[in-house]
Amino acid sequence: MRHYDGFFKHGRGFPRFQNRSTFRSFQYKPGDARIDGNRIYLPEFGWMRFFNSRTIPAGFEIRTVTVRRKIDGWYVSVLIRDESVPQIPAPKEIKTVVGVDMGLTKLAHLSDRSDFDNPRPATSKKGKRFLKLRQRRVSRKKKGSKNRKKATQIVARLHKKHVDKRTAYQWDVANQIINRADAIAFVNLNIKGMKAKCKPRPDDVNVGRFLKNGQSAKRGLNRSISDASWGTLIDLIEYAAGKLLKTFFKVDPKNTSRTCSKCDAVDGLSRFGEKFVCTSCGYSTHADKQAAINIKRRAIENNGLTILVVRKPRKVRQDLPEPKQLSLFETPTPEPTGVKRRQHRAVKGKRDVPGNLPNQLSLDLWGNVGCGYPHESHL
Ligand SMILES: [Zn+2]
């Protein structure tokens, strides 16, 4: 009854009915499932073949296993953990820090003045139109009919396509960002708060009815925020940074877009949309880049970091490669002895070859907490 009260008395949404399709995944506790090559043992089901997309590195134990149904099949994601991976405290002296500010017109602005596009798979003009057409096909079919079910699956497939596109792009952006610096600083976003619904406005004249509260306009913005999925990007960067033993900072977002990075004056009037013109000193720049610089500065100040100034040694000979810095888990590659260095070309489908394992090992480790990112494989 609580949910109906919410609808009738407090202006919340109508309660959703739960049915079979509400539950699309189930989990096994640590120790229940086992993996042997491309076979997985799931209690109640027995041994099943599956597509093993990533090998589990040696030393890791299998924790929770989740089986999930998606539109194009069943997926299993495996959480792995290795207690022996050491916890490394964040260093106080670093060479480079990059601040990142997230947005909608551009997905991210960096303090080094570069930016990343926001592809908006679901909310671009094209994405919205495709979704609308597919959804219209559903609504034109008779309720409860087989054709309606088929049309619904086409919509679901389109949604999954958007998700896959977004994830692939975000991994790319995450890897590019962490390669820019030794430490990455982000704002602590309250995405749930940003996406919150507008407060319902009860109508005093017609008791029990509600006045317009601007929610329909807000909905579009919320969809854009979901489509950019900043939270996932931050998670991916935090994960990827941990693997390479890079430091990850979250700072308070308050006033990052209102503070002048030249004279520290805080004024909301300094910002005009994408432009930032300081009302105190007249310094003008791009508003989001300015915010990224403020985020970087805040991370340095709050964490008491010392930025080591490194002068690049003068190169004596052009053909001598600079010694590459290796992270803890990377295996050193032997220096080329021949005159010509052979290009290492990635061959499709060769990732699971045992010879490639050391390379992949560095990819699969989760350095800071000694815990693996869930492996997701097609069943
Ligand atoms: Zn100023």
Image (cartoon, grey):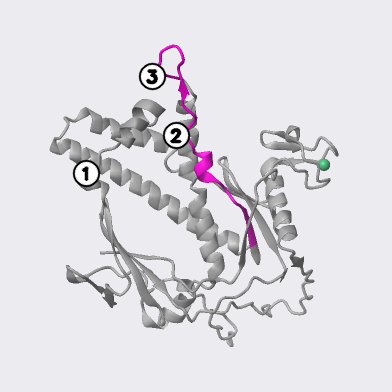
Q: Are marks 2 and 3 in contact (CB under 8 Å)?
A: no
**Which range of residues does the magenta coloring cover?**
184-211
Spatial CA distance of label 2 from label 3 is 38 Å
Instruction: Judge from the rendering whether residue 139 lies leftward or rightward of residue 224; answer left or right.
Output: left
Q: Is residue 7 magenta?
A: no
| Numbered disc 3: secondary structure | loop
- Position in image of residue 58 (x %, y %): 40, 82
Q: Which disc is residue 208 wearing? A: 3
Label 3 crowd (10 A; few <14 / some 14-19 / many >=20): few
**Nearest to viewer (mark 2 / mark 3):** 3
Q: What residue sits 72% from the left and 68% below the top?
A: 95
Query: Farthest residue toward the left?
Result: 145
The residue indicated by pointer 1 is: 19
| Numbered disc 1: secondary structure | loop
Label 1 crowd (10 A; few <14 / some 14-19 / many >=20): few
Q: Amino acid at mark 2?
A: Lys
Spatial CA distance of label 2 from label 1 is 33 Å
The residue indicated by pointer 2 is: 125
Quarter of image, res 67: bottom left
**Nearest to viewer (mark 1 / mark 3):** 3
Instruction: Judge from the rendering whether residue 90 lies leftward or rightward of residue 360; answer left or right.
Output: right
Q: Nearer the viewer, residue 218 or 137?
A: 218
**Labels 2 and 1: the sequence-earlier one:** 1
Q: Is residue 210 magenta?
A: yes
Please say if 145 is above or below 165.
above
Please say if 22 is above or below 27.
above
**Nearest to viewer (mark 2 / mark 1):** 1
Image quadrant, ligand 1: top right
Q: Amino acid at mark 3?
A: Gly
Q: What residue sits 72% from the left and 40% below the top?
A: 258
- Position in image of residue 256 (x %, y %): 69, 45
